[in-house]
């Protein structure tokens, strides 16, 4: 085959991957699970459980999506998730605050932590990887101090029943919350000037600056969104576990990154869509549920997540190179 033919095939693959890659991964995963143990996966009780497990992943991935969209990253989403839930739990249990204002304050804490990340990125000029790696450690440390390294129990019954309820006994409230957040963010990215500017910022920061886009402001907005999504995820996770665990958010940053990348978000910046990220979060939920149903050790889940990230980024890089060669 000629060099021209190889380039054309590479470009065709790149177009197909960008359009259908996420759905292809989802289909392949379902086929594998159907072959491995269909009875444990495809039944009336499995789908609600997968949706419930996917809710936190979808929320964190939606926030991570914005950080990656500007060719950055937010490694602190898991820590922000855990700390936001811990704050809300302390307010409910220790301060005896009603659960609604306690949860609102918990989410606002996530927003503040995201604001802090964005502020540090803007003021220091350091890559978000360095800033969020540092704040990740700080937030986990604060969580251990606040909780005295112990789980917090004893939430109001109304909170636990609400967060674990299901619509029509099938759609978990937590999954509905995640989808509503995704719809709002989809509207933001597709229908607002700030959303379009965020894509431009990820495509070429210098060109965006010359075109009049306020780069520091949009960077700040991106991390505020990421922190807010992590704050909401913290409330959902706390409700699902029915306790606030000081290490509950550990590893969720990996899941968020994996979901965003599998969902078609490019590490090069400027490419990706919220619906794809939602499917990516659902894929992570299916993997976690499926491996648990198949009684596979949780250590292998981490191996699979790491492998998925490497494979997805490698394909993304290949697609970017092939589509740019004309």
Image (cartoon, rainbow, N blue to C red):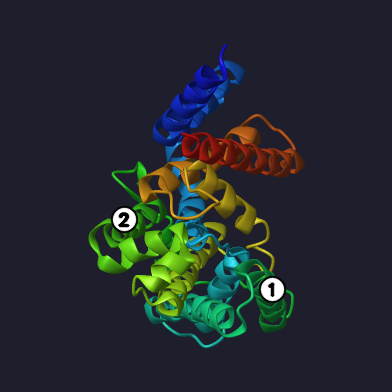
Secondary structure at numbered mark 2: helix
Rendered residue at 62%/83% (across/down): 124
Picture layout, residue 118 above or below residue 195: below
N-terminal label among 1 and 2: 1
Q: Residue at x 38, y 77 (%)?
A: 214
14 displayed left or right of 214: right
Q: Quick check: 27 above or below 142?
A: above
Pick the residue in front: 158 or 285: 285
Residue 126 at x, y percent in the picture: 64, 75
Dot 1 surroundings within 10 Å: few (below 14), some, or many (20 or more)? many
Res 40 → quadrant: top right
- Can residue 229 be seen here? The reply is no
Q: Foreground mark, 1 or 2? A: 2
> Residue at left 46%, top 34%?
326
Is 181 on the left or on the right of 228, as rendered?
Answer: left
- Point out the residue furthest to the top here: 1
**Residue hosting label 2:** 186
CA–CA distance in space, label 1 to label 2: 30 Å
Q: Dot 1: what SS?
A: helix
Residue, disc 1: 140
Picture quadrant where residue 51 is located: top left
Give the label on residue 167, or none.
none
- Identify which residue is drawn at 32% across, 59% down: 189
Percent coordinates x, y for residue 182 in the rendering: 35, 55
Q: x and y percent of residue 66 in the render?
A: 46, 61
Taking the view exactly as shown, the residue that stands out farthest to the left is: 191
Nearest the camera: 10 or 75? Answer: 10
């Amino acid at each position: 085959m000629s060099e021209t033919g190889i380039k054309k095939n590479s470009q065709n693959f790149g177009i197909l991957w960008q359009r259908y890659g996420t759905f292809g991964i989802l289909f392949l995963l379902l086929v594998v699970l159907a072959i491995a143990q269909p009875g444990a996966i495809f039944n009336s009780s499995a789908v609600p459980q997968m949706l419930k497990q996917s809710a936190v992943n979808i929320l964190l991935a939606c926030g991570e999506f914005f950080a990656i969209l500007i060719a950055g990253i937010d490694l602190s989403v898991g820590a922000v998730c855990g700390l936001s839930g811990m704050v809300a739990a302390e307010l409910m249990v220790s301060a005896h605050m009603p659960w609604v204002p306690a949860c609102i304050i918990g989410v606002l804490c996530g927003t503040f932590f995201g604001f802090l990340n964005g502020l540090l990125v803007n003021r220091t000029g350091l890559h978000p990887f360095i800033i969020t790696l540092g704040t990740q450690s700080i937030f986990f440390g604060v969580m251990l101090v606040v909780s005295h390294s112990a789980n917090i129990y004893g939430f109001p019954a109304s909170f636990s029943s609400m967060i674990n309820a299901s619509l029509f006994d099938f759609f978990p409230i937590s999954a509905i919350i995640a989808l509503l957040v995704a719809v709002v963010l989809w509207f933001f990215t597709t229908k607002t000037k700030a959303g379009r500017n965020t894509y431009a910022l990820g495509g070429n920061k210098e060109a965006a600056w010359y075109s009049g886009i306020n780069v520091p402001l949009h960077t700040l907005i991106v991390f505020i969104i990421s922190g807010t999504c992590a704050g909401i995820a913290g409330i959902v996770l706390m409700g699902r576990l029915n306790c606030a665990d000081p290490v509950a958010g550990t590893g969720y940053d990996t899941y968020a990154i994996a979901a965003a990348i599998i969902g078609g978000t490019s590490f090069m910046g400027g490419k990706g869509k919220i619906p794809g990220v939602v499917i990516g979060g659902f894929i992570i939920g299916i993997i976690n549920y499926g491996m648990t149903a198949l009684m596979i050790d949780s250590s292998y889940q981490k191996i699979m997540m790491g492998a998925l990230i490497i494979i997805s980024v490698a394909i993304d890089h290949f697609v970017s190179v092939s589509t740019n060669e004309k």
